Image (cartoon, rainbow, N blue to C red):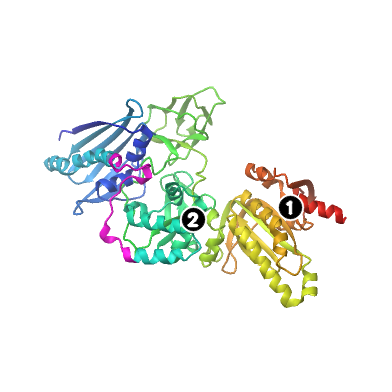
């Protein structure tokens, strides 16, 4: 059977980056143009060819077809290609290439090249009835975007089934959410989002994208989403992300379902769950409010792995060129499945790479564009040019479990007994009420206990307002956790600055010691509560013991953070650096004592 090739071209009053984001987001685009959803098998490989996934779908919801889908090839903002080799159905082979060219001032010319190879005579009918109309709809997607007048790609038009939206239930639960301690404006924005956005957007609610859409602070958006989940508007889930391809490998409805280790068939690696990077929080609309599903059409497209700037198949004995994007940092080349990596840097002479059966012949390559890669191995390979650093905008388990609202609303969300999940960076704050024994002697048990409880509320308020949460109380001491060091430092400063005002409401002048430290830890289930253990926790507890009262003692690790250092430039603070040996900790530890200058003056006068 002869192949049929169709070329469609059109110019748009749209910049190339926006056009790319529209057409390279294959799941969102295919849902809008009405293609059939697809299910995929794990990656397979036959002989020396590159790996593929077997895909299954039903055309028009009736006719079953299957094919081998090979890795997408692309250069960001320039072009992408997808190849399918059919196993069943009337077609034998299909490729689609989408190219983007500058046109005039802030304009883009889009070129689609679709090649169909029919298996039999019925294949020609399938091309005209289904294949070619689908390609034409790709162009129409940009037309509809421009006609909609929306401001961002995230607001691109999406189809929805209004019959599956339960507006009375949405109204009722939104009214319930409005009674929570959240801004009413956010309640209205969420109501409109759940009613108006497409199925894909409400079935996979990404907090970072919502914050951008609303032009809102991410923590504020997270709070309203958490309260909305408690009210029954949303469901939450935990996605385990591969550290290389950064695609979700498994989804759990509870932290208790997390396992210690996971496998990525695409990257060919095993990896441990990690709260900082590999476990992310996602939300979806509750099915009683709206029936919506994040249908899968593609699992290897450019926007599924946006950290990958370019990806190419390089056959054995062939050479391919990669254009290095300007102004991009921390780039590397990686061979998919083999997982061999080479850093892109300016510190070496060569901008050429060779890949062999034993891996790369060098560890680094010059980022002078283009970089030529020659594959001398016995198999075809897939090479990705990608960012090596992690997406810091993702809402990780480490971030959300450090929020007081999460602990208050979802106290039952804990790891399974015996489970341990690592956290690379966490900030621990310990507080202690100095002279509490004397307080009980002078105020009596009942009076002292009441003041201790009030001081817990005082501490919790400042900790929560700075994106932290109280992990537990130990006698009259508090252990709190923060995702970012600067948030812990803000909370500590706020506590000491406002303690004098709080003391006006008590019969005693309470004196607090505060200690702050950042580092790695493990999250565990302790007495049905999410708790933290490890050296970082031990050091934070010991640092608090170095306090004199009305001061804050922090480690040099906290001061080394740029945003923390900026907070300490305030004119009303006095810093005192010192080193000491902490009980049970090997070697001397460098610390910084922070005094409020007002308190330091009082201390000197009293001395």
Was residue 289 drawn as part of the magenta stretch in this picture? no
Is residue 236 visible to the viewer in this orientation of the structure? yes
Is residue 71 visible to the viewer in this orientation of the structure? no
Give the crowd class for mark 1: few <14, some 14-19, many >=20 residues within 10 Å.
many
User: Which residue ends up furthest to the left in the rendered image?
Assistant: 121
Magenta-colored span:
145-168
**Residue 385 position within the rendered picture, expressed as x and y whole percent measured from the top left:** 45, 34
> Is residue 477 toward the left or the right of residue 396 in the image?
right
Image: 408 above or below 348 = below
> Is residue 48 toward the left or the right of residue 5 in the image?
right
**Residue 489 position within the rendered picture, expressed as x and y whole percent measured from the top left:** 66, 51
User: Which residue ends up furthest to the right in the rendered image?
Assistant: 607
Element carrying mark 1:
strand
Q: Which mark is residue 222?
A: 2
Q: Circle 1 sits on which residue? A: 553
Query: Foreground: 401 or 215?
Result: 215
Whole-number angstrom distance, CA of label 2 to CA of label 1:
30 Å
Give the crowd class for mark 2: few <14, some 14-19, many >=20 residues within 10 Å.
many
Position of the C terminus by quadrant: bottom right
Which circle, 2 or 1, is nearer the viewer? 2
> Is residue 583 toward the left or the right of residue 370 in the image?
right
């Amino acid at each position: 059977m002869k192949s049929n090739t169709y070329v469609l071209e059109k110019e748009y009053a749209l910049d190339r980056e926006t056009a790319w984001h529209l057409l390279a987001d294959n799941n969102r685009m295919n849902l809008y143009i009405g293609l059939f959803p697809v299910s995929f098998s794990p990656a397979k490989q036959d002989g020396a060819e590159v790996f593929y996934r077997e895909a299954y779908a039903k055309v028009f919801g009736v006719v079953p077809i299957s094919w081998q889908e090979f890795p997408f090839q692309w250069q960001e903002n320039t072009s992408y290609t997808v190849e399918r080799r059919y196993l069943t159905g009337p077609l034998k082979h299909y490729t689609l290439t989408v190219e983007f060219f500058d046109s005039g001032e802030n304009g883009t010319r889009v070129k689609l090249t679709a090649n169909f190879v029919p298996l039999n005579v019925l294949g020609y009918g399938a091309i005209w009835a289904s294949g070619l109309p689908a390609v034409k709809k790709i162009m129409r997607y940009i037309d509809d975007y421009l006609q909609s007048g929306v401001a961002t790609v995230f607001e691109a038009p999406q189809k929805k089934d209004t019959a599956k939206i339960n507006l009375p239930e949405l109204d009722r639960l939104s009214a319930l959410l409005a009674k929570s301690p959240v801004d009413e404006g956010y309640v209205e924005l969420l109501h409109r989002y759940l009613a108006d956005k497409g199925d894909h957007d409400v079935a996979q609610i990404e907090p970072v994208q919502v914050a951008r859409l609303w032009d809102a602070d991410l923590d504020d958006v997270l709070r309203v989403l958490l309260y909305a989940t408690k009210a029954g508007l949303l469901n939450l889930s935990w996605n385990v992300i591969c550290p290389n391809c950064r695609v979700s490998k498994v989804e759990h409805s509870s932290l208790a379902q997390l396992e210690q280790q996971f496998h990525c068939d695409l990257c060919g690696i095993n990896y441990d769950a990690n709260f900082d990077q590999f476990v992310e929080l996602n939300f979806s609309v509750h099915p009683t409010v709206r029936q919506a599903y994040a249908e899968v059409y593609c699992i290897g497209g450019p926007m599924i792995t946006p950290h990958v700037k370019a990806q190419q198949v390089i056959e054995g004995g062939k050479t391919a060129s990669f254009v290095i994007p300007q102004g991009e940092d921390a780039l590397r080349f990686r061979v998919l499945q083999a997982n061999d990596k080479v850093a892109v840097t300016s510190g070496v002479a060569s901008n050429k790479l060779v890949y062999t059966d034993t891996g790369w012949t060098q560890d680094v390559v010059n980022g002078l564009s283009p970089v030529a890669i020659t594959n001398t191995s016995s198999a075809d390979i897939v090479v990705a040019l990608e960012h090596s650093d992690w997406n810091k905008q993702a809402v990780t388990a480490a971030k959300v479990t450090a929020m007081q609202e999460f602990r208050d609303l979802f106290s039952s969300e804990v790891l399974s007994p015996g489970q341990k999940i690592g956290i690379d960076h966490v900030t621990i704050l310990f507080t202690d009420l100095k002279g509490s024994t004397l307080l009980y002697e002078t105020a009596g048990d009942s009076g002292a206990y009441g003041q201790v409880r009030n001081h817990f509320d005082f501490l919790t308020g400042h900790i929560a307002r700075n994106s932290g949460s109280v992990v537990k109380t130990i006698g009259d001491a508090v252990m709190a956790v923060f995702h970012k060091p600067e948030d812990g430092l803000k909370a500590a400063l706020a506590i000491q600055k406002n303690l004098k005002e709080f003391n006006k409401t008590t019969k005693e002048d309470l004196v607090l010691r505060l200690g702050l430290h950042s580092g790695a830890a493990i999250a565990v289930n302790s007495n049905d509560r999410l708790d933290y253990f490890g050296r970082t926790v031990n050091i934070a507890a010991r640092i608090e013991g170095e306090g004199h009262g009305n001061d804050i003692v922090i480690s040099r690790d906290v001061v080394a953070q740029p945003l923390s250092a900026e907070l300490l430039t305030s004119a009303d603070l006095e810093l005192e650096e010192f080193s000491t040996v902490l009980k049970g900790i090997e070697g001397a530890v460098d610390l910084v004592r922070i005094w409020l200058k007002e308190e330091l003056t009082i201390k000197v006068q009293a001395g």
